[in-house]
Amino acid sequence: MSSYAQHIATVQARFDAALAASGFDSALVYAGQPRVAFLDDNPAPYKVNPLFKYWVPVIQSPKSAVYYEPGSKPIVFLHQPRDFWHAHVDVPHEEWQNHVELVVVDAPEKIASYLGSKLERSAFLGENFAEPVASWKTAAVNPQALIDHLHFHRAIKTSWEVENMRQANLLAATAHNAARDAFFAGKSELEIHAAYLAAINFRESEVPYNSIVALNEHGAVLHYDVYQTQAPQESRSFLIDAGALYRGYCADITRTYARTDGFFADLIKAVDQAQQDLLSEIKPGINYYQLHVSQHLKIAQILSDFDLVKGSAESIYEQGYSSPFFPHGLGHFIGLQVHDVGGHQRNDRGDMYDRDPRHPFLRLLRDVEVGQVFTIEPGLYVVDQLLEDFAGNNDFNWQRIDELRPYGGVRIEDSVVVGENGNNENLTRDAFAQIES
């Protein structure tokens, strides 16, 4: 059996269980459609419903749908409009078409006509902001119990999903190397961004999120995506957080570079080593929160070693001194979405972990399990807004912090597939190694 055949069998089984648990006969998963700008007819870039591409690797066919009733073959309604204004999206024949009943429609109204009374017994999953979908009489729209059940189990990836994420990481790693070279060639942020896209022949709308392309102090802005059009007079440092998509699955990679040897280059090496040390601690059965705290202690040790903050790693962490330098969570699930779902769920019934007040931005609080895929992305930055609360604190070496400020900060991010007994797969580092071999 092929990996896709195994995948769609798993998706069917998960929908079987979710529908039974939530009391619905069937599900209609709508791919979605573009939204237009306010008071305009110009659409925003289209992003497919992740639950649609969970079934089939079709990401550019809006107004399509998957209908699934347990015990029956999934029906994929592939929307191909009769339209002389726009080019048709090419959907080549691939293996997925052998596992579904494929029905080509030229208008979404034909989906409702085809299903007839079955539509009224079906749970609708997706956006229904536009007609005719908005008026469809379904059993429910996005019922939370059904979504909770599906989201919880999506955390365990199938082999086919991991295969796609390997390819996404290869694409992203290729583009990262092109961006790195553009940095060392003295290019502007916008030029570096263009080099990234050109390396993998992507349009800007085809990457899974707005790339973070940050020179110098811009590296301290966690989601920086402004892109200066002129190169700075002195290009000291470069932080890039950027990904790629393959068959609807995401890569999310961050790397940091220094133009010259010295203090900041040494800091990058220290954060990189701290991240790799943390990777060796990932084993089934521990809680992701434990990993987050362990990484904080490692960042605290760096703060001490580089004379940024006085004290031992333990005292720095306990006093909350590491948080302004490392304010975000250690990582998140990744897969069909960059920040994939289910990170705070205790179970498939919708019970949730409470956010920890000490680390409110941590997106993942579940126990580590074989088959999960998540990122590990520690950082160390000079964020003045966060340091304001510690103004005048003599445990902080403000002169040393001033030396770091023009470089912004460091972040290193890899995606990891959890294996048995710590035998994990690092999708990101493996991709770079494959390119460079």
Image: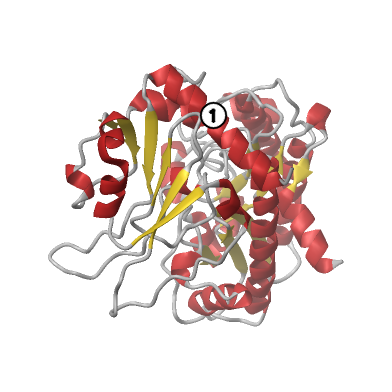
**Residue kind at label 1, given as amino acid type:** Arg
Front residue of this view, candidates 265 and 209: 209
Tell me residue 296's x, y (percent). 63, 34
On-image quarter of the C terminus: bottom right
Q: Residue at x 46, y 55 (%)?
A: 223
44 and 281: which is toward the camera: 44
Q: Which residue is the site of mark 1?
A: 14
Is residue 357 visible from the viewing direction of this image? no
Q: In this view, does 300 lie above or below 238?
A: above
Q: Which one is nearer the viewer's eye here, 190 or 396?
A: 190
Image: 262 above or below 271: below
Residue for point 80% across, 35% down = 280
Residue at 62% across, 28% down:
288
Spot the residue most to the right.
437
Quarter of the image where one finds residue 83: bottom left
Relative placement, left or right, of 214 versus 418 is left
- Residue 103 coordinates in the image, percent (x, y): 42, 54
Q: Residue furthest left?
A: 39
The answer to whether residue 84 is visible is: yes
Secondary structure, mark 1, is: helix
| Residue occupying the point 70% across, 45% down | 3
Taking 388 as reference, is 189 above or below it?
Answer: below
Residue 316: % across, % down: 62, 30
Where is residue 402, by image quadrant?
A: bottom right
